[in-house]
């Protein structure tokens, strides 16, 4: 089965997941992003790479942060940006997902940035465009269900590379609600593809997906053991609705076992970096002293995120 | 009408027949095998040279979508699909809209089916009113109207007290229950087997225990009540071991597996192929191997098509929103033949799983080619392969995870009651 995000020449035409992407393509995106980081510091924060192109932010699930960063990225590439917050109301109007897409293609969309609560929705759109021989229209997955959030994964990789230079000597720990996390899945694929020797996932068994080891990670239920000697800690957001109920008894108990404090962080390497995809729940998964502390690179992640999204859109639009 | 089916390989598993001979059909019945009856003048001769002449297939699970779901398929379309697949007798589950919980609905369905003059249709009655799991249906009335058994379709039965009463009541009158083992809670939000693939694709999981817990409940109550239970569409290895043990203990249980579960596993979901969204879910290669072995050793008695035609609109949506199910009537024979060829199962043993074994559960004397029996016959070329494509399917549902695959076994003629109802 051909990877649906690559064209016949093996070039990236959609970004749907980091799974199965050749390492050179991932490195290429990170390399392309590097010069874009400094654009934000210029007086004129624009390059003309996507001039005349229309980027449609197609958000079936609400998001302010991701949509905004995509919008900024597209605008810095000189694209026209159209935001569609479709939410759950579209289904009540009776229009199917693919009908919506066909209509927007008829309005000459060039890139769809898609967020959807269902895993695989961006694949469905990409397959539909591929089958209809409309390969000039590209799809960027901005998060689908629990499945993937590839641009977040890429900005995480960018951040790690920025601070650690290489992947082949790193131990990375991902902590928290791995079960529901598309961020974790994308980062795991990215890290393993780039040759990270040890990727750990840390959390209670209720928040670990079945047979997660098959993704190439080591599982730890004890956070202290899991943090020992790591170079990078990635904290995952715990959704409010999951803090009480059958998955976890309370936010307080969760913080006690899996919240990142200075004391637990001291078990990691001294030059450890702390990452978080945001938005943070201070006092639930991370202590403010750590979030705002010297080891935190949470805000640089946001800056790199814009550059990485610029890189992704400029690359796929050229293929 | 006299028809001579000339020089085919007659495979009649029920009667232990496997030989090249001619089969003579007169007055809707098998008149003779081998030597022609006296004064034989056929109206038509079907040259079955190199073909297999088998009893018409019997399918225990074919959703015809009537009443109520005609936008997915109609009786007309699906009855054509049945005969094109060599199926001459089928049972349909009660998950129609409304469910088959009243004798009038059952009688109407039977009447509609009969008027089409195609496969014999045996409705399976709803076990509870509206399949709501609260009140028992009038099983006696429903049986009189033609229900061959009672089931709860794919709706989980949470109330074990009601299940026990249903079994006691059914056992009182000798009715059989056909049940799919499914826990009402475990994995209820799930859409794929809870394993590596679901984890990778970010799909909510359905653990194997969702089936085995319900199966243990059913077997425990069946043991107590003595009711005849048929377990439909098993999906996991542990279930096979449990059925094997139950049979060893002499429990009156039988079981079937859906044809697609013999060939596919969760990996076949690929990049979210909605046609692989099935109930029960596709499980692991280990489960698939256990299902195949269980079928070969007789733990599983029957292969069913689990026919579920779904319209394109309900499949061209994200995987988790897709209506589950696959069209199957036309693939029952090919997928059974493929299993037999892959695992070295002799043809008669394979055909038994889709002829006499299921027939035993729906109609005495069906699913065989003994002299004097109704001439329901499936004549097929076991070596001809065909490609599963939308255009190749008569069913209104084009939804199958086998699209693009070459499968063995092309039906040449289907006879029902001595009439040719399909030829290609």
Image (spheres, grey):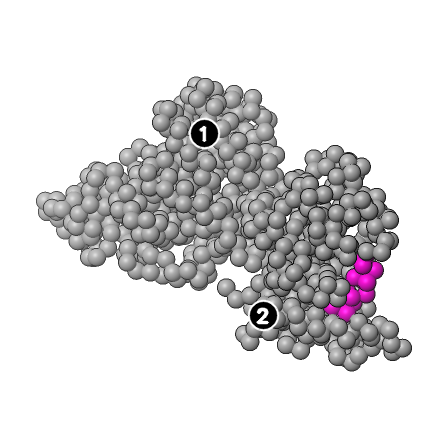
Other residues around mark 1 within 10 Å, as few (<14) / some (14–19) / many (≥20): many
Residue visible at 22% across and 38% down? B15
> Residue B376 sits in which quadrant?
top left
Residue A96 visible (yes or no)? no
x, y (%) of residue A56?
A: 74, 68
Segment colored magenta: A296-310
x, y (%) of residue B242?
A: 43, 31
Relative side of B62 to A132, left or right: left
Which numbered disc, 2 or 1, marks the residue closer to the eye?
2
Residue visible at 44% across and 62% down? B404
Helix, strand or loop for the magenta stretch, by majority: helix
Residue wearing tag 1: B177
Residue wearing tag 2: A6
Quadrant of the rendering where the C terminus of chain B is positioned: bottom left
Outermost residue on the front side: it is A270
x, y (%) of residue B182?
A: 53, 35
> Residue A23 sits in which quadrant?
bottom right
In the image, B172 versus B357, the foreground residue is B357
């Amino acid at each position: 089965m051909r990877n649906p995000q690559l064209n016949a020449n093996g070039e990236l035409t959609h970004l749907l997941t980091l799974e199965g992407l050749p390492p050179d393509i991932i490195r290429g995106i990170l390399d392309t992003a590097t010069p874009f980081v400094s654009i934000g510091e210029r007086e004129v924060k624009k390059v003309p790479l996507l001039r005349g192109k229309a980027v449609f932010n197609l958000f079936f699930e609400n998001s302010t942060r991701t949509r905004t960063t995509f919008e900024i990225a597209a605008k810095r590439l000189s694209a026209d940006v159209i935001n569609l917050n479709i939410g759950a109301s579209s289904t009540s109007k009776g229009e199917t997902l693919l009908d919506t897409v066909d209509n927007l293609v008829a309005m000459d969309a060039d890139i769809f940035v898609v967020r959807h609560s269902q895993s695989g929705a961006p694949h469905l759109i990409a397959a539909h465009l591929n089958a209809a021989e409309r390969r000039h229209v590209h799809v960027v997955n901005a998060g689908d269900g629990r499945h993937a959030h590839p641009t977040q994964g890429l900005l995480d990789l960018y951040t790690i590379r920025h601070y650690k230079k290489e992947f082949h000597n790193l131990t990375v720990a991902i902590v928290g609600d791995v079960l529901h996390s598309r961020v974790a899945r994308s980062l795991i694929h990215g890290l393993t593809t780039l040759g990270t020797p040890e990727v750990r996932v840390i959390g209670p068994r209720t928040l670990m997906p079945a047979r997660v080891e098959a993704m190439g990670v080591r599982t730890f239920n004890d956070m202290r053991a899991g943090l020992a000697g790591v170079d990078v800690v990635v904290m995952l957001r715990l959704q409010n609705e999951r803090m009480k109920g059958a998955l976890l008894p309370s936010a307080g108990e969760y913080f006690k076992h899996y919240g990142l404090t200075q004391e637990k962080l001291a078990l990691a390497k001294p030059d450890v970096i702390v990452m978080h995809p945001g938005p943070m729940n201070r006092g639930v998964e991370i202590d403010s002293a750590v979030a705002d502390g010297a080891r935190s690179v949470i805000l640089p992640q946001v800056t790199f995120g814009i550059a990485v999204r610029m890189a992704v859109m400029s690359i796929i639009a050229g293929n | 009408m006299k028809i001579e089916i000339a020089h085919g390989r007659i495979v009649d598993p029920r009667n232990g027949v496997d030989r090249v001979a001619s089969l003579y059909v007169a007055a809707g019945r098998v008149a003779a095998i081998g030597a022609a009856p006296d004064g034989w003048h056929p109206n038509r001769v079907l040259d079955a040279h190199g073909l297999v002449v088998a009893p018409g297939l019997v399918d225990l699970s074919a959703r015809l979508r009537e009443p109520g779901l005609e936008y997915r398929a109609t009786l007309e379309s699906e009855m054509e699909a049945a005969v094109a697949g060599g199926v001459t007798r089928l049972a349909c589950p009660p998950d129609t809209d409304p469910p088959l919980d009243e004798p009038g609905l059952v009688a109407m369905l039977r009447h509609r089916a009969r008027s089409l003059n195609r496969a014999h249709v045996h409705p399976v009655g709803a076990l509870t009113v509206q399949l709501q799991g609260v009140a028992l249906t009038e099983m006696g009335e429903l049986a009189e109207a033609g229900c061959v058994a009672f089931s709860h379709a794919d709706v989980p039965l949470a109330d074990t007290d009601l299940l026990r009463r249903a079994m006691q009541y059914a056992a009182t009158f000798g009715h059989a229950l056909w049940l799919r083992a499914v826990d009402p809670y475990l994995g209820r939000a799930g859409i794929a087997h809870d394993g590596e693939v679901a984890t990778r694709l970010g799909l909510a999981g359905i653990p194997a225990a969702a089936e085995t817990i319900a199966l243990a409940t059913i077997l425990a109550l069946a043991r107590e009540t003595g009711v005849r239970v048929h377990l439909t569409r098993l999906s996991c290895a542990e279930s096979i071991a449990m059925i094997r043990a139950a049979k060893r203990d002499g429990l009156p249980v039988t079981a079937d597996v859906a044809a697609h579960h013999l060939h596919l596993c969760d990996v076949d979901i690929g990049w979210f192929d909605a046609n692989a969204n099935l109930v029960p879910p596709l499980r692991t290669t280990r489960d698939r191997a256990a299902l195949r072995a269980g079928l070969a050793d007789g733990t599983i008695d029957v292969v069913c098509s689990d026919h579920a035609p779904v319209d394109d609109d309900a499949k061209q949506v994200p995987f988790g929103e897709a209506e589950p199910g696959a069209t199957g009537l036309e693939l029952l024979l090919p997928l059974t033949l493929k299993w037999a060829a892959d695992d070295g199962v002799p043809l008669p043993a394979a055909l038994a799983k889709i002829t006499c074994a299921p027939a035993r559960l729906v109609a005495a004397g069906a699913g065989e080619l003994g002299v004097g029996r109704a001439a329901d016959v499936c004549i097929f070329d076991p070596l001809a392969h065909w490609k599963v494509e939308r255009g190749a399917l008569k069913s209104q549902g084009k939804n199958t995870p086998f699209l693009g695959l070459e499968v063995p076994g092309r039906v040449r003629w289907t006879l029902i009651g001595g009439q040719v109802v399909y030829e290609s």
